[in-house]
Amino acid sequence: MERKVLPHNHSSNEEHILENLPTIDDCRMVADIFKQISDGTRLRILWFLCHCEECVSNIAAAMEMSDPAVSHHLRTLKNTGLIVSRRDGKEIYYKLADTQVADYVHRICEEIFHITCPLE
């Protein structure tokens, strides 16, 4: 990898910072996750799925939304890896993914919004 040199030296640790600069792909992945939770409806659905596994119809009823609208939000959350699904017959059930990123998002939501997990 080519060593980067900045035009102006304002700090003694610039070289160390440049060596550890995240890639654009890493930043895009994080930005995609923030995009998902920046939508209030998706954030609400995500928080709900942090605490239970549910089908689209039950999620829609809880959110007071239509099944197609909820399905749209679920698809985008699933595409970023924050939730997972499983099929049982004709029903598809959704829940929070068992990943470090999904767990961090769950904990951040609870800390920032002072929303206490009902299962803890």
Image (cartoon, rainbow, N blue to C red):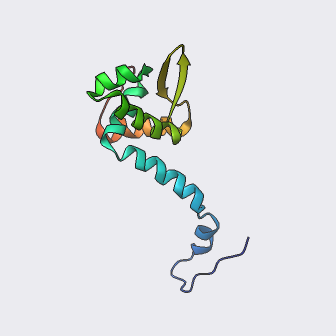
- Judge whether 73 appears above or below 93 on screen: below
Quarter holding the N terminus? Answer: bottom right
Taking the image as shown, residue 118 lies to the left or right of residue 102, namely: left
Outermost top residue: 89
Q: How many marks?
A: 0
Q: Nearer the viewer, residue 36 or 2?
A: 36
Image point (30%, 32%), residue name: 115
Give residue 78's position: percent from left, percent from top: 50, 36
Is residue 118 among what the camera can see? no
- Judge whether 30 appears above or below 3 on screen: above
Give residue 56's position: percent from left, percent from top: 40, 24
Give residue 61's position: percent from left, percent from top: 29, 22
Q: Quadrant of residue 88?
A: top right
Q: Quadrant of residue 113?
A: top left
Image point (53%, 56%), residue name: 28
Q: Nearer the viewer, residue 65 or 16?
A: 65
Q: Nearer the viewer, residue 83 or 16?
A: 83
Taking the image as shown, residue 5 lies to the left or right of residue 60, namely: right
Image point (47%, 36%), residue name: 75
Taking the image as shown, residue 62 lies to the left or right of residue 102, namely: left
Q: Nearer the viewer, residue 94 or 105?
A: 94
Is residue 62 among what the camera can see? yes
Q: Quadrant of residue 22?
A: bottom right
- Judge whether 91 appears above or below 63 on screen: above
Give residue 80's position: percent from left, percent from top: 51, 42
